[in-house]
């Protein structure tokens, strides 16, 4: 059987024959490819694949190659091919070996060029006249000369081309757009699009361009977006957009200037300002090119001019098309015919109307003839029946014309005639009546304005479109800090949408917003102001955690640590999702934890694991971190400690920073004794150690760094066995303080409590202020109290003592590293304690302690003066531990404005010996001052007071002013000299309710002196040691005469005479009623007779206030006897008490009149007459 089988096989054996050979392939990079061929032979051929002469097996590069052989078809599948390679195969059986090869060419085509944008341009602010460049660096992979991407720049989705205003650059890994001279026309949303065959990468940001400083204070900003429309042989319409006015006065018009291309001669087109943002410019020279610019005008002056428009040619559009067509090689053949005089124009109509002009348009006559055409326009006011030629002096060459000098509100009809050198045509058909009026109205104010949070420096503003907003250019948005009443413009070029992001705001500040709409007529009224909004980032998912570190491993679990997300998304982080998987496995397994370090259980020993972590907050789950490196699950047994983790950099200043870290979870064979901190510049390989000796703290201030350089840091823990694993390298840190960096400051509040405070404008609702002492979080509520409100936090010391000395720090989460520290040394601590004690136990500073002084009458004054006393200050006098109140014996007073408190004692006696004290309290502040008068000190004061009193009494009568003295004259005579002073009297007259009182003041009086009054029968006599008086009761004409007062001092009589005869005080004789009622809008006249000798002075009062005279209130005094008050057109406000004051030097009186005013249809008020008598006025 074996021999027979061999014979059969021998008869059918054949060498390998390749039926379908391998062919060359051109494929895209990273693309999978399959190489196939078909072979037959017997025995079955063996196929071997080779790459660059090296045998290929599936085990050589797992996952890259797959080899199949079925039914003579052999396949080599290559996964993600990269470069040019030659593949061979060897087919063999026992009869023959057949080689075959397939080359992959070097010319590889790429399906996708990877473009990654690196440094991107952000929101940019510029000013008119400046130069500016927007640029973006990028990484292009692969960078091939013949397959370069295309960079395109857009402004508000309009493609930007190279011009004299903009320069474009793309190359060397950078795309840039440069502005040679910024104008508000350049403001807008800029987009960079990098286009490849595989897709588009784009980035966009807004460019704001504010007005240049005005040439005249208060003048408006320049107009913008000047464009030309409907250009013809001698005519063009110029349009523009108005500037925004915030603090400036409104714009009331514009001037349009033109300049012929190739010259610098600018000519103003309109004599008076045009009120709308559109103007038809006439009088152009055919065939010439022009540029235009516009200036705005308000009451303060004229603005800078706008950017000049693009050049426009004064040509008929048909001629312009002919020229352009001839340029590209087109040929026009016309057959004008034998027309001489042209026909009339057709389709005459008003293409545009406004309050100041009407633009007429028409079609040229058909046929038009060979000769050039001109046009004449005629107008007629409806109903007048007469026609007036508008352009009698200058013929129009364009089929369009602006007619000015029309009367507003009147209707006109128009007709047009065409002409050439052969003659004038018949008039065209008459237009329907046309009225000069604006077809577009001023827009109404936009509706409700709402601001919402966006970023730390921007707010999204949205508003309702105006109810009446035809042909809008867009909107202007203004903003103001709450309470400042100062408005600024956000955008300087109208934006078309009813949503806008306002950038450049201060973090944590409160703003309000308003919007106004803009069209060709002008700007609307301001919308209502939005509700105040605080500038904070919008709520988002947290950013990803980073820096995943293996902290410990026991063979079945791993302890991981990671750094918190840089930003929490405006809401506190609620927890973390940990995804784990074994190396080379596809599926991730999820685990939720709360802390920033966690033990992951149920792991397989000696297996490799990788992890990724995502944070979550109230909004949702953020992006996961990049997968960690592969960690091997094996038990740690090394004697050195494990790595430190959670390296945090804070308090970054120009040359120093503070580095914080957490102790290793794995301590090794012994406890940790200290730490080394290493650092280096980013571009340097060698590490430096910041501390020569280990530090036992979990923080270190690293100094002597170089400003402007970027550093990275790492920490190594040390125990008795040696130095352990290094921590993960920190994030790069640029050595410069953050913008707006603030420091901790100390102080004492109104209650005397010592505190440390810190302000952080960057703080959000999710930010937490973490106070530390020696960089360990403070949790001792018995010694400290923390109060945080908004962007402000305070650390209060409850019972300050020496143990509170040390370094205090604060860090604010969800910010760009806002942090600070404060060293509480002994000097600062003592200063704060002293200030606290002063506030808790305040004293009123005294200018003068309690003192005394003596007056001429023997009175003793005790007084002191404080630095300052408020109106609420209180005080008291205490003598010998008994409070003294204000009375006749102790006259106590206080001048709080001057801070003087005093007490005057009329009689100072032997009983007044003792201690005098003044106690003062002003709010919480207190003070007191004492004066001790006992023994010899008191006797001296008492003796001086007695002496002064006796001297005062002696001097009240006749007394020696200078005692007897002698001198020898030139004649050898002895002269005895003394001076004697007598007492003085002063007489006064007083009017009392009972009559007239005659009063005489005395300097001195004794009981032995005799006093007599003469010339009066009805009198009462009285007096005291200082005053003698006589009362004349119910005086009449009979009481006139001379009154004599006589006093006898024992040696002689002293008389004083007062003449009361022939003197008449001022008085009202009659004519005035007690009550007057009068109807509204009538005229009231109050008249009376007055008398007095000499003539009295008359003054009118209302409600005891002197009248202010005007056209409504008129007074008069005729012949010195007749006084009157006239009130024209009385009203209810004129109701009240009116008084006439009649007075001369001998006195006078006041008479009252009550006036009541009632309205039409009202009942007559019932007012009872008063029985008030005239009130007397004393003499001057």
Image (cartoon, rainbow, N blue to C red):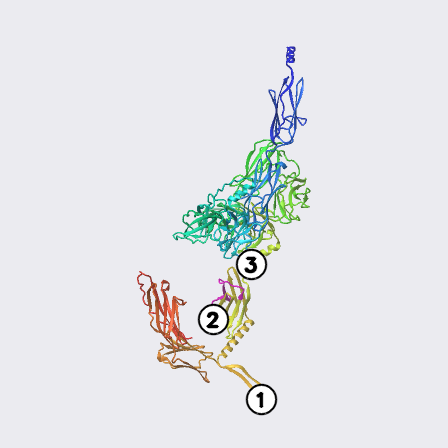
Q: Quadrant of the C terminus?
A: bottom left
Q: Work out how far the residue at label 1 is from the one at label 3, CA to CA, in angstroms.
A: 75 Å
Residue 973: mark in rendering: 1
State which mark lies toward you, 1 or 3: 1
User: Total marks drawn?
Assistant: 3
Residue 838: mark in rendering: 3
Which of these two is toward me, 128 or 246? 128
- Measuring from the top left, give residue 412's x and y in whole percent: 41, 51
Indicate left or right for 1031 with 942 as reference: left
Which of these two is toward me, 993 or 800? 993
Q: Which residues are magenta?
A: 865-887
Q: Quadrant of the N terminus?
A: top right
Dividing the picture into quarters, in which one does residue 1171 lie?
bottom left
Q: Is residue 973 above or below residue 857?
A: below
Residue 248 visible somewhere in the drawing: no
Q: Earlier in the sequence, mark 2 or mark 3?
A: 3
- Asked if disc 2 and disc 3 are in contact, CB closer than 8 Å, the reply is no
Judging from the image, what secondary structure is the residue with disc 1 in?
loop
- Measuring from the top left, give residue 840's x and y in whole percent: 54, 57
Q: Work out how far the residue at label 1 is from the one at label 2, CA to CA, in angstroms.
A: 54 Å
């Amino acid at each position: 059987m074996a021999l027979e089988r061999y014979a059969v096989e021998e008869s059918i054996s054949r060498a390998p024959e390749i039926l379908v050979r391998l062919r060359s392939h051109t494929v895209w990079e990273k693309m999978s490819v399959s190489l196939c061929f078909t072979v037959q032979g017997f025995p079955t051929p063996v196929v071997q694949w080779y790459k660059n002469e090296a045998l290929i097996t599936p085990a050589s590069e797992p996952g890259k190659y797959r080899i199949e052989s079925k039914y003579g078809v052999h396949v080599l599948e290559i996964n993600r091919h990269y470069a040019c390679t030659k593949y061979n195969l060897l087919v063999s059986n026992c009869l023959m070996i057949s080689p075959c090869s397939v080359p992959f060419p070097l010319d590889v085509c790429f399906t996708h060029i990877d473009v990654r944008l690196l440094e991107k341009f952000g929101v940019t602010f510029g000013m008119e006249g400046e130069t500016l460049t927007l640029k973006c660096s990028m990484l292009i992979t692969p960078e091939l000369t013949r397959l370069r991407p295309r960079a395109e720049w857009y402004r508000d989705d309009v493609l930007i081309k190279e011009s004299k205003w903009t320069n474009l650059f793309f190359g060397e890994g950078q795309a840039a757009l440069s502005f040679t001279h910024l104008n508000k026309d350049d403001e807008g949303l800029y987009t960079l699009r990098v286009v490849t065959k595989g897709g588009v990468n784009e980035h966009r940001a807004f460019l704001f361009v504010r007005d240049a400083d005005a040439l005249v204070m208060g003048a408006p900003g320049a107009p913008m977006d000047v464009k030309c429309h409907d250009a013809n042989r001698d005519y063009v319409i110029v349009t523009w957009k108005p500037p925004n006015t915030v603090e400036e006065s409104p714009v009331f018009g514009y001037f349009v200037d033109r300049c012929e291309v190739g010259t610098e001669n600018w000519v103003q087109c309109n004599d008076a300002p045009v009120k709308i943002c559109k103007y038809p410019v006439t009088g152009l020279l055919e065939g010439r090119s022009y540029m235009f610019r516009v200036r705005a005008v308000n009451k303060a002056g004229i603005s800078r001019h706008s950017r000049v428009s693009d050049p426009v040619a004064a040509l008929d559009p048909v001629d312009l098309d002919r020229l352009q067509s001839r340029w590209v090689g087109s040929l026009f053949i016309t057959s004008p015919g034998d027309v001489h005089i042209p026909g009339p124009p057709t389709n005459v109509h008003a293409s545009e109307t406004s309050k100041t002009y009407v633009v007429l348009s028409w079609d040229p006559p058909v046929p038009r003839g060979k000769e050039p055409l001109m046009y004449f326009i005629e107008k007629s006011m409806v109903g007048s029946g007469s026609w007036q030629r508008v352009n009698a002096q200058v013929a129009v060459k364009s089929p369009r014309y602006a007619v000015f000098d029309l009367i507003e509100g009147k209707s006109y009809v128009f007709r047009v005639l065409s002409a050439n050198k052969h003659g004038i045509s018949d008039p065209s058909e008459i237009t329907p009546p046309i009225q000069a009026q604006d077809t577009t109205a001023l827009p109404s104010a936009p509706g409700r304005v709402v601001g919402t949070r966006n970023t730390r420096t921007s707010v999204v503003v949205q508003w309702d479109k105006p109810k009446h907003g035809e042909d809008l250019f867009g909107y202007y948005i203004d903003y103001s800090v709450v309470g400042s009443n100062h408005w600024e413009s956000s955008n300087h070029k109208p934006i078309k949408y009813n949503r806008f992001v306002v950038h450049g705001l201060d973090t944590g500040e409160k703003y309000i917003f308003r919007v106004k709409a803009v069209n060709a007529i002008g700007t609307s009224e301001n919308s209502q102001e939005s509700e105040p909004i605080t500038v904070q980032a919008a709520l988002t998912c947290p950013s990803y955690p980073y820096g995943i570190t293996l902290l410990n491993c026991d063979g079945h679990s791993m302890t991981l640590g990671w750094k918190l997300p840089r930003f929490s998304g405006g809401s506190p982080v609620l927890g973390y999702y940990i995804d784990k998987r074994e190396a080379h496995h596809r599926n991730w397994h999820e685990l939720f934890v709360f802390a920033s370090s966690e033990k992951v259980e149920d792991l397989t020993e000696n297996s490799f694991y990788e992890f990724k972590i995502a944070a979550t907050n109230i909004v949702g789950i953020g992006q996961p971190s990049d997968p960690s490196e592969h960690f091997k699950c094996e038990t740690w047994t090394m004697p050195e400690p494990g790595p430190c983790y959670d390296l945090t950099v804070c308090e970054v200043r120009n040359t120093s920073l503070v580095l914080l870290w957490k102790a290793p979870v794995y301590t090794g064979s012994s406890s940790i004794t200290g730490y080394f901190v290493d650092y280096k510049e980013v571009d340097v390989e060698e590490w430096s150690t910041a501390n020569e000796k280990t530090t036992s703290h979990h923080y270190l201030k690293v100094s002597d760094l170089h400003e402007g350089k970027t550093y990275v840091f790492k920490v190594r823990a040390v125990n008795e066995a040696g130095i352990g694993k290094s921590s993960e390298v920190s994030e790069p840190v640029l050595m410069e303080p953050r913008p707006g960096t603030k420091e901790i400051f100390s102080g004492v509040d109104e209650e005397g409590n010592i505190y440390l405070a810190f302000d952080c404008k960057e703080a959000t609702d999710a930010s937490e202020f973490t106070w530390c002492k020696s960089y360990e979080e403070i949790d001792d509520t018995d010694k400290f109290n923390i109060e945080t409100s908004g962007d402000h936090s305070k650390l209060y010391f409850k019972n300050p003592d020496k143990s509170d000395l040390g370094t205090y720090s604060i860090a604010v989460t969800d910010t760009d590293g806002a942090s600070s520290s404060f060293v509480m040394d002994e000097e600062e601590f003592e200063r704060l304690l002293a200030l606290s004690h002063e506030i808790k136990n305040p004293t009123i500073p005294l200018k003068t302690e309690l003192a005394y002084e003596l007056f001429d009458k023997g009175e003793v004054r005790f007084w002191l003066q404080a630095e300052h006393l408020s109106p609420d200050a209180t005080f008291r006098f205490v003598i010998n531990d008994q409070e003294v109140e204000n009375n006749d014996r102790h006259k106590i007073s206080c001048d709080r404005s001057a801070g003087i408190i005093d007490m005057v004692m009329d009689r100072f006696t032997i009983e007044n010996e003792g201690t005098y004290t003044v106690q003062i309290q002003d709010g919480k502040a207190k003070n007191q001052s004492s004066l001790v008068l006992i023994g010899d000190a008191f006797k001296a004061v008492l003796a001086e007071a007695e002496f002064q009193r006796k001297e005062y009494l002696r001097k009240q009568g006749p007394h020696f002013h200078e005692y007897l003295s002698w001198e020898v004259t030139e004649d050898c005579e002895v002269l005895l000299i003394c001076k004697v002073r007598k007492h003085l009297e002063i007489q006064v007259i007083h009017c009392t309710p009972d009559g007239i009182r005659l009063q005489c003041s005395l300097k001195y009086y004794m009981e032995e002196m005799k006093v007599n009054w003469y010339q009066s029968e009805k009198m009462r006599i009285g007096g005291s040691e200082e005053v003698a008086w006589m009362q004349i009761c119910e005086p009449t004409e009979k009481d006139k005469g001379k009154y004599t007062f006589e006093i006898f001092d024992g040696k002689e009589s002293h008389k004083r005479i007062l003449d009361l005869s022939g003197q008449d005080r001022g008085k009202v004789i009659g004519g005035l009623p007690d009550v007057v009622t009068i109807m509204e809008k009538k005229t009231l006249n109050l008249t009376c007779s007055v008398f007095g000798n000499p003539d009295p002075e008359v003054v009118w009062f209302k409600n005891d206030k002197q009248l202010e005279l005007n056209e409504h209130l008129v007074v008069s005094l005729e012949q010195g006897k007749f006084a009157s008050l006239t009130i024209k057109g009385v009203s209810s406000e004129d109701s009240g008490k009116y008084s006439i004051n009649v007075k001369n030097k001998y006195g006078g009186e006041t008479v009252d009149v009550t006036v009541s005013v009632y309205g039409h249809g009202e009942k007559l008020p019932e007012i009872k007459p008063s029985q008030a008598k005239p009130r007397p006025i004393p003499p001057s």
